[in-house]
Amino acid sequence: MRPLKILTWHTHGSYLYYLTQTPHEFYVLSKYDRPPGYAGRHGHMPWGDNVHDLPVEQAARQQLDCILFQDDPHFFFDQYQYLSASQRHLPRIYLEHDPPRGNPTDTLHPVDDPNVLLVHVTPFNRLMWDSGRTPTRTIEHGVIAPAGVRYTGEFARGIAVVNHLAKRGRRLGADIYLRAREKLPIDLVGMAAEELGGLGEIQHSELARFTSRYRFFFNPIRYTSLGLAVIEAMMIGMPIVGLATTEMPTVIQNGISGYVDTDIDKLIMRMNELLQSPNDAQKLGAEARRYAMERFNIQRFVNDWNNALRFVAGSTGIFAVATSARPH
């Protein structure tokens, strides 16, 4: 059995890190100035030896087994600009990270191709997109529980983790975060968090340890995919409070692993209760961790991705795919 050589893009750094725990070789497109989407093997993630930086001008000469698109420009422009004709006929997967931005039920996915596998990261996303002729499947997130980090909750404060919240506005819940912060002590971390009076960006390798001291994790997001930061917080045993939208109601059970609701005042009340009762917060967090370890463990994620890769690459009869997660 041999690993596959997979071409992809650096679209979401955390997701790419977990994806590369699969036992395959990843060639990540890069440009010399590392603009968004073309960072390659770059940044503060602890990339493994199976992650390779691939300058776009060298892509057409690279031997590959599969193309993994992660954004519309990759599919509609990059493959024609940077890949050879033979590479464009390789097995192809389009990884859709988000629900539809326009009409939430009647938006046709841009990729309408029976020869491409469309992978959604949540069942909600798969439900809402009209995927047309394209075969689909769901591969839910998988994360690695950080070694030696567990929830303590000694800070009587909440923490929210959202990148560029000021710029992304209502969809990511900027107004909801500010409303909650008027009533409760809640800090914000993430890229450009300072724009809303937050603490700034925390490197991924330090994020779990940093958040572990806060009493609860607050997710103000109205409408996007299930955030990896939510799952990572659950993995260390944090109770979660957030909006009962998109995939969140299937992840958090009220009074068991946290609280979700569409009434912001009720969420503020629940967060205040957690500030007053660290023991209750500990109990909720323990159940959140148990559930996350069951549903979002990294080996299940690896197995699902190997099955998807078999589906697109196995029909040629020349690929044999390894099945275990990489050591980490």
Image: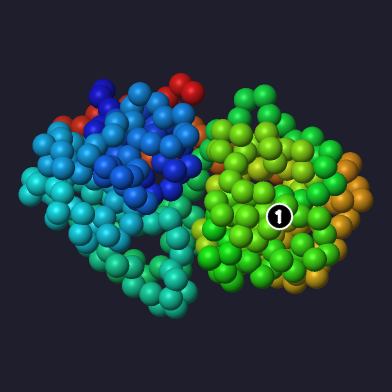
The image position of residue 214, as x and y in percent, is: 77, 43
Quarter of the image where one finds residue 26? top left
Q: Is residue 140 above or below residue 293?
A: below
Q: Is residue 170 above or below residue 297?
A: below
* Residue depicted at x 68% and y 37%: 210
Q: Total marks drawn? A: 1
Question: Is residue 321 or residue 198 the one in the foreground?
Answer: 198
* Residue depicted at x 24% and y 29%: 320
Q: Name the kind of residue labelled 1 in the image.
A: Phe
Quarter of the image where one finds residue 31? top left
Quarter of the image where one finds residue 171? bottom right
Is residue 79 shown left or right of residue 199?
left
Is residue 243 shown left or right of residue 313?
right
The image position of residue 312, as x and y in percent, is: 25, 45
Furthest residue in direction right, as rendered = 276
Is residue 303 in view from this perspective?
no
Q: Is residue 35 above or below residue 209?
A: below
* Residue depicted at x 60% and y 41%: 202
Is residue 135 in view from this perspective?
yes
Where disc 1 sits, the SS reads strand
Q: Which residue is mark 1?
A: 218
* Residue depicted at x 59% and y 50%: 190
Dot 1 alpha-carbon crowd within 10 angstroms: few under 14, some 14 to 19, many 20 or more: many
The image position of residue 184, as x and y in percent, is: 82, 59
